[in-house]
Image (tube, grey):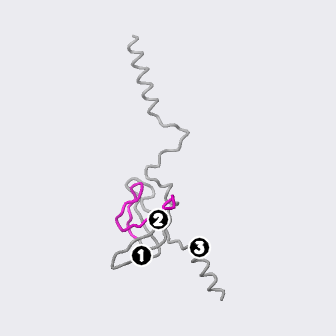
Amino acid sequence: MATKRITVACLLVLMLAGMRDPFQPPLDRCMTSQLELWHYQGVVIMAEAATGIVRDPAGRWRRVQKGDSLLGGWRVVDFDKEEMRIATGEGCEPARWQWKREGSQNEKNSNRSSLSQ
C-alpha cells in the first residue's frame, strides 16, 4: 500500500512539474513579437546580385539575399527598393510579413529643406 502511495505521489509531482506557469507568457516559438523591431533600410544591386539591408533589434546591420534565413526560422522571400517580404515559418501566425523601406533622418531633413527652397 505504501508503494502505491509513493508511486502516485511521484507521478503527481512529475505531472505538476511539467505544467506551464500560467502567469508567464507562452513561449514565442516563431518570434513574431520581434517582427516590428526589425527595420528594412533598402537594397543594393551590383552585377545582377541584389542585397537587402536590414537592422535587427540589437541595432546590428545585416546584409540578406533571397532565400537567406533570419532568426526564428524566418526566410527572406523577396525584396525590392520599397519593401522586403519574409515567410515566418510553418505553423506561425502571420505566415508572411513585410517591412517597408525606412529612410534615414538625414534623408528626411534634406528632402524637407529642398522643398522649401
Mark 2 lies on a secondary structure that is strand
Residue 108 horizontal/vertical position (percent): 59, 77
* Amino acid type at mark 3: Gln
* Residue 44: assigned label: 1
Q: Residues within 10 Å of mark 1 (few under 14, many from 20)?
A: few
Specify the quadrant of the image occupied by residue 80: bottom left
Is 83 colored magenta in this rendering? no
- Mark sitting earlier along the chain (1/2): 1
- Mark sitting earlier along the chain (3/2): 2
- Mark sitting earlier along the chain (1/3): 1
Q: Residues within 10 Å of mark 2 (few under 14, many from 20)?
A: some
Is 58 colored magenta in this rendering? yes
Residue at figure coordinates x 42%, y 75% from the top left = 44
Residue behind mark 3:
105
Residue at figure coordinates x 39%, y 72% from the top left = 51
Assess whether mark 3 and mark 1 are in contact (beta carbons under 8 angstroms): no
In the picture as drawn, the residue positioned furthest to the bottom comes out as: 117
Q: Provide the residue span drawn in magenta.
A: 55-78
Residue at figure coordinates x 34%, y 65% from the top left = 67
Mark 1 lies on a secondary structure that is strand
* Amino acid type at mark 2: Trp
In the picture as drawn, the residue positioned furthest to the right comes out as: 116
Q: Residues within 10 Å of mark 3 (few under 14, many from 20)?
A: few
Residue behind mark 2:
61
Task: Describe residue 37's horizontal placement relative to residue 80 as left or right.
Answer: right
Residue 106 horizontal/vertical position (percent): 58, 76
Quadrant in which the N terminus appears: top left
Q: In this rendering, is residue 69 above or below 13? A: below
Between the residue at mark 1 and the residue at mark 3, the CA separation in whole angstroms equals 19 Å
* Amino acid type at mark 1: Val
